[in-house]
Image (cartoon, grey):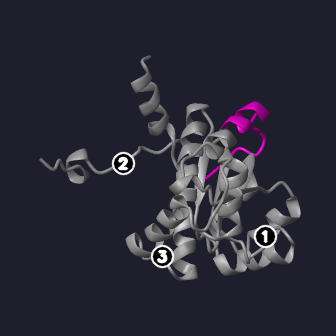
């Protein structure tokens, strides 16, 4: 099988799994590969505005079910259950940007550097990002790139997944904050996702035709 078919077959295999087999667990090396696909994902300016919470605590899983209706099947059957956070108030002078520039990129940080000024202009002038909600939504968009990469990687490894937005965001954040798992001054919940092995027949994948969604500008 050539690489093109391998890639497309992984995408065809992936679907939002509604029923997982709770007796089947993902091997440690496969899980490490899925996580690495998330960690290596691209983000705007390379600032990686995300954090991945793996929920293993059974009491937490039970507590979440009343406030995360879309996650119940994953909470009850998936081998691994992730809550992915997006950073709040990510601006050119934020502590996280300073950390990324100095500790990850390995260059000195300055509020007057060309990189900082360019980022500031991008946020304020190009994308009109100024409010806390606008900044969070922008950061949350970055986390979805990691989600797609993790789910596709899982499918390539014959592992199933289910992306989840079916939850009460305020209630989940309040619960995680009360338990000490999330600092709401820094993070908000972006999405949840379950990974494991399906316990259902895979449905037929239905999508719009390419002609409906693809246009060439000549």
Q: Residues within 10 Å of mark 3 (few under 14, many from 20)?
A: many
Cα gap from disc 3 to disc 2, whole angstroms: 35 Å
Disc 1 secondary structure class: loop
Residue linked to disc 3? 129
Closer to the chain start, of discs 1 and 2, is 1
Q: Residue furthest top?
A: 1
Q: Which mark is residue 215?
A: none
Give the labeled residue for mark 1.
182
Name the element at disc 2. Answer: loop
Q: Position of residue 36 (x, y in %)?
A: 67, 40
Q: Quadrant of the N terminus?
A: top left
Task: Specify the principal SS of the magenta part.
Answer: loop
Residue interval drawn in magenta: 18-33
* Residue 74 appears in view: no
Whether residue 174 is in magenta: the answer is no
Q: Position of residue 88 (x, y in %)?
A: 64, 72
- Specify whether residue 51 is in view: yes
Residue 113, horizontal then vertical, whole percent: 56, 62
Classify residue 21 by image quadrant: top right
Position in image of residue 147 (x %, y %): 57, 51
Between residue 123 and residue 199, name the one nearer to us: 123
Residue 154 placement: quadrant = top right
Work out how far the residue at label 1 is from the one at label 3, CA to CA, in angstroms: 24 Å
């Amino acid at each position: 099988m050539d690489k093109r078919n391998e890639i497309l077959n992984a995408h065809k295999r992936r679907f939002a799994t509604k029923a997982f087999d709770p007796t089947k667990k993902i091997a440690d090396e496969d899980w490490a590969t899925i996580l690495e696909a998330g960690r290596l994902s691209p983000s705007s300016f390379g600032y990686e505005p995300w954090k991945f919470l793996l929920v293993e605590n059974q009491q937490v899983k039970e507590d979440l079910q009343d406030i995360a209706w879309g996650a119940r099947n994953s909470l009850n059957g998936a081998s691994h259950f992730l809550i992915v956070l997006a950073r709040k108030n990510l601006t050119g002078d934020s502590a996280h940007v300073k950390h990324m520039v100095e500790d990850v990129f390995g260059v000195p940080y300055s509020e007057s550097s060309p990189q900082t000024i360019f980022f500031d202009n991008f946020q304020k002038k190009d994308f009109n990002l100024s409010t806390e909600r606008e900044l969070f939504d922008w950061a949350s968009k970055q986390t979805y790139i990691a989600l797609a990469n993790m789910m596709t990687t899982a499918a390539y490894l014959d592992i199933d997944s289910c992306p989840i937005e079916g939850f009460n965001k305020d209630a989940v954040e309040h619960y995680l904050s009360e338990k000490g798992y999330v600092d709401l001054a820094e993070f908000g919940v972006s999405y949840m996702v379950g990974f494991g092995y399906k316990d259902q027949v895979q449905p037929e994948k239905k999508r719009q035709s390419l002609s409906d969604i693809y246009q060439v500008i000549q």
